[in-house]
Amino acid sequence: MARRSLLVGFGSFLPDRVVTNDELAARLETSDEWIKTRTGISRRHIAGPDDTAASMGAKAASRALEYAGLAATDIDAVIVGTSTPDQAFPATAVRIQAELGMTQGFGFDIAAACSGFIFALSTADSFIRSGLARNVLVIGSEVYSRIVDWSDRGTCVLFGDGAGAVVLSGTDQAGEAGILSTHLHSDGTAGDLLYVDGAVGRPEMSGHLKMNGRDVFRHAVAKLSSSVDEALEAEGLSYSDVSWLVPHQANIRIIEGVGKKLGLPPEQVVVTVDRHANTSAASIPLALDEAVRDGRIKKGDLVLMEALGGGLTWGSALARM
Ligand code: COA
């Protein structure tokens, strides 16, 4: 039997501070009603001064290790999806290794914006299938509160901070379980629809997130639809086989659109965007952790994950729990 990656651990971390739509409406020309109707977002968590991608990622990772019943010394690789690293280098993943007390194995970051977790999961799965690693921590950790322009009501209301993590473990005895397949795409010709204006290599730029919301919305609906079809077709599965959709959490209207396409009732779609807003690469592992721990997602369930983000990047992953 071919080697497979099992999802064996789940963890997440959200900063303490909660910012409601009304709090934003007190300092911006916006309203709770506008934000809720257009996006489904009611509130978001915002990092405190000591919360960073590395510190939050390490906390989520510790919880995922505990869930898996593994020690940090059992881990061969740490892969972090983030667009908001603490430093240009060392990578967030390497800082997290140190935080967890790991000196073995290796770690690196993946920059695929809101698709970062799917790209990291795919990379980890490939390492496991090839035999390069056995146990891998896959983390999404983001502090978008530090890259949004807090005076731009068109973008700042959409994002929140947080981290999520999963542990993947390789086995030759998975049976039906494990990551079935992952599917990745990027198209840089649409790079100017959603981007951060500068980085350490371009310090003269603003460093703020910029977005053409309408065009991103159009791309999201089309590309996520084709991405879920691609995943199911690759495995010879159909919409009715899906137990749970665990989508990237950007906008409830995009999430519901994909859910409807799959013919899934809302009860089979994991939604956190109302409470977390868009936490970019952290959103899928945050949602997974919630739905596994509250007992919704069970052993044997078929879970379909999908995301789209700046790049544009997009992709999907199918996993049997
Ligand atoms: N509060 C009140 N009004 C706002 C606002 C806010 N926070 N943000 C924008 N507006 C205004 C705009 O200025 C515009 O006013 P105008 O018509 O007078 O010019 C109006 O609302 C409509 O703006 P528009 O951008 O066309 O709204 P929309 O229906 O497209 O909704 C988004 C905006 C951002 C919610 C929507 O485009 C979206 O969700 N896009 C996808 C974004 C996304 O998911 N990005 C991340 C992908 S990972």
Image (cartoon, rainbow, N blue to C red):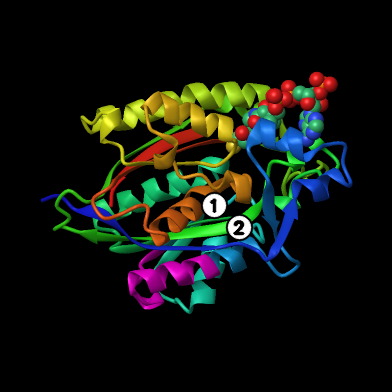
Q: Quadrant of residue 39?
A: top right
How many C-alpha atoms fall within 10 Å of the one at disc 2: few (<14), some, or many (≥20)? Answer: many
Main secondary structure of the magenta stretch: helix
Q: Quadrant of residue 49?
A: bottom right
Q: Nearer the viewer, residue 11 or 31?
A: 31
Residue 319 visible, this angle: yes
**Tag 2, which secondary structure?**
strand
User: What is the x, y in percent for residue 48?
Assistant: 73, 65
Residue 9 disc label: none
Q: Does the Cβ of the disc 1 residue fall within 8 Å of ligand 1?
A: no
| Ligand 1 found in image quarter | top right
Farthest residue to the left: give it.
1
Q: Residue at x 22, y 52 (%)?
A: 4
Q: Is residue 230 left or right of residue 118?
A: left
Residue located beneath label 1 in the image:
282
Q: Nearer the viewer, residue 188 or 220?
A: 220
> Is 50 rendered above or below residue 126?
below
User: What is the x, y in percent for residue 321?
Assistant: 28, 52
Residue located beneath label 2 in the image:
162
Q: Which residues are magenta?
A: 59-77
Q: Are marks 1 and 2 in contact (CB under 8 Å)?
A: yes
Quick check: is 160 in the magenta stretch? no
Q: Residue at x 40, y 37 (%)?
A: 316
